[in-house]
Amino acid sequence: MSAALAILKDVFGYHAFRGRQAEIIEHVAEGGDCLVLMPTGGGKSLCYQIPALLRQRAGHGVGIVVSPLIALMQDQVAALTEAGVRAAVLNSTLTGAEASAVERDLLAGRLEILYVAPERLMTPRFQDLLDRTRVGLFAIDEAHCVSQWGHDFRPEYIQLSVLHERFPQVPRIALTATADDVTRQEIVERLALHDARVFLSSFDRPNIRYRIVEKDNARQQLLAFIKAEHMAADGTHDSGIVYCLSRRKVEETADWLRGHGINALPYHAGMDAAVRQQHQARFRDEEGLVMVATIAFGMGIDKPDVRFVAHLDLPKSMEGYYQETGRAGRDGLPANAWMAYGLGDVVQQKRMIDESEADETHKRVSSAKLDALLGLCETAGCRRVRILAYFGESSEPCGNCDTCLEPPATWDGTREAQMALSCVYRTAQASRVHFGATHLIDVLRGNATEKIRQWGHDKVSTFGIGADRSVSEWHAIFRQLIAHGLLVIDHGGHGALLLGESARAVLKGETSITLRRQVSKPARGERGERGGAGRGNRVDHTAQMDEQQLANWEALRRWRTETAREHGVPAYVIFHDATLAELARSAPDSMAELAEVPGIGAAKLERYGDELLEVLQKA
Ligand code: ADP
Ligand code: ZN
């Protein structure tokens, strides 16, 4: 293990392994197969990069990494090259000549790590290359891409089991951040990893603060959130991602945010490919950009300092939510996951499931996944406990989510639940069709709309019995009744509500219902969110710095920007913010002191040491 630690320090500049990294590295370096389940930001890359280096240096040959995303591969190779590793990539972005050069290096044994796209790996040409090369290990990143249930399914991944048949003696390490049991089984099955050791880490991301607010005016709420928590006094703001469901909404939201002083860019699959790529590169390379995107954006984004992920629409599933929010705070520093959601989102997602081409089983699974997410949105308990429980982990209330920080009050909503349920029953009985929440709330509040008169619902016994509650209160009640399974959204896409199985017991007064009290609305506009959960989660590297340290910080950042530009890599590939902040604070004045700063490995020390000392001296 001391050899692994030496590489950790020399190449990557880190002082200690995280979580189960050490165990995994030892297992693979000794030639064992394994499946690694670790959350985003947990540090999966080192789990194969270090064994690859160890095995290559011990004469076993090059480490081959299969990765589904071109952008991700390129970032990884850039970072490895910066750290002095002989790494290369083979994918469709290379010219014929470039690819030939990589192939020559491979055959000559000059490479330590080679990243390959799955479709290329399986070509006869590459298989032939493999036959003529010594291979030290195969790493299969994003291994959940073999799963047909997941949204990242890649048909080429299924063929990867061939690796095992053709190279039985070469250890394989498969990695994923998708934790659920079904996916895990599928990976084991399809990649023939039955004898592999499974390393399961906790999926908790303790540095992420989860918050889910009721949708009121979602854009305004988002703006208030960014201003309150991610904007400095001078108007600059953190990097973040805002997810929306539709392309149009992405465009509109990005425009609107730009009009309100936020440096925002759109990203979705319908955009011109060149523009899209340019936006992605800017997000990666620049500081303080907000990317407004559909879920087409994300896989392959390993920017470490994304400080927030916001959802303006409900994701499809807990898996989706967790994967998307997981893109915040990979560097381990505080980050926010913020979502605004309303009943309309649930109805919309439900409609998308119903209208999809999928078969009935798939639709049923999708509906169940949506329900689990709805449960998270409506819980009065700790969000994290709920999320982790979904992934099969039990935990204690976290103290770092909205419901922990500001426990919502609950109330006995039995009477209101009965009103709502019997309104569903009565209107359906009167008209032989079912209705959506908006109409039902009009009936309950005695709002004699044209539609109500047309259907004769001003004559049903529940007309006007809930007039003392506001529309938004009723919305909250309906959402929770759905989350509790007392109401079910009908197939057919109109958001019509049916009675759930357990509704009868409530109607008969056999069970009582506890509801979460609606949180009073935050003031609109500039004032931001209320205190409590809304405060004190901003990462400010300069918070405690004196004047000299601030001058160091500014000088170091200017140096980093220039250097990154010269090398054609993102700034964080040169050094993370945390490393720069530590440099600014401790202002080392010798190579020996520099080497002690986390994030400065041997290669970077040699390459940048003199420059850093000079920058610090002049600052
Ligand atoms: P994952 O692929 O699991 O999402 P990464 O491999 O990208 O995570 O690692 C996330 C971040 O954590 C990276 O910035 C990486 O440099 C950092 N990291 C990983 N392992 C360590 C460690 N042992 N010490 C310090 N930082 C680490
Ligand atoms: Zn909590």
Image (cartoon, rainbow, N blue to C red):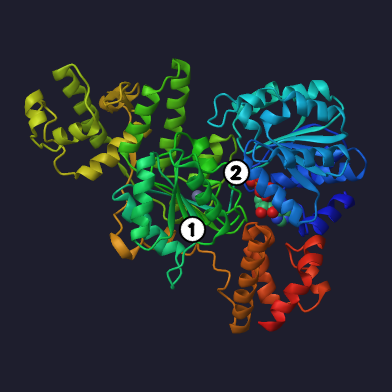
Question: For residue 247, which quarter of the picture?
Answer: top left
Few, some or many residues within 10 Å of mark 2 (<14, 14–19, 20+):
some
Residue visible at 59% across and 49% down in the picture: 205
Q: In this figure, which residue is indicated by the disc labeled 1?
A: 289
Front-most of 270 and 330? Answer: 270
Cα separation, mark 1 vs mark 2, equals: 17 Å
For mark 2, give the secondary structure.
Answer: loop
Marking on residue 466: none
Which quadrant does the C terminus fall into?
bottom right
Q: Disc 1 marks which amino acid?
A: Leu
Dots 1, 2 in contact, CB < 8 A: no
Q: Residue at x 75, y 51 (%)?
A: 80
The tag on residue 300 is 2
Q: Quadrant of residue 183?
A: top right
Q: Is residue 602 among the parts visible in the rendering?
A: yes
Q: In the image, is 92 to the left or to the right of 539?
A: right
Compared with 115, 409 (above or below) is below
Q: Earlier in the sequence, mark 1 or mark 2?
A: 1
Left/right of residue 482 with respect to residue 107 in the rendered view: left
Q: Please tell me how crowded label 1 is: few (under 14), some (14-19), or many (20+) other residues with Cα within 10 Å.
A: many
Residue at 89% across, 51% down: 3
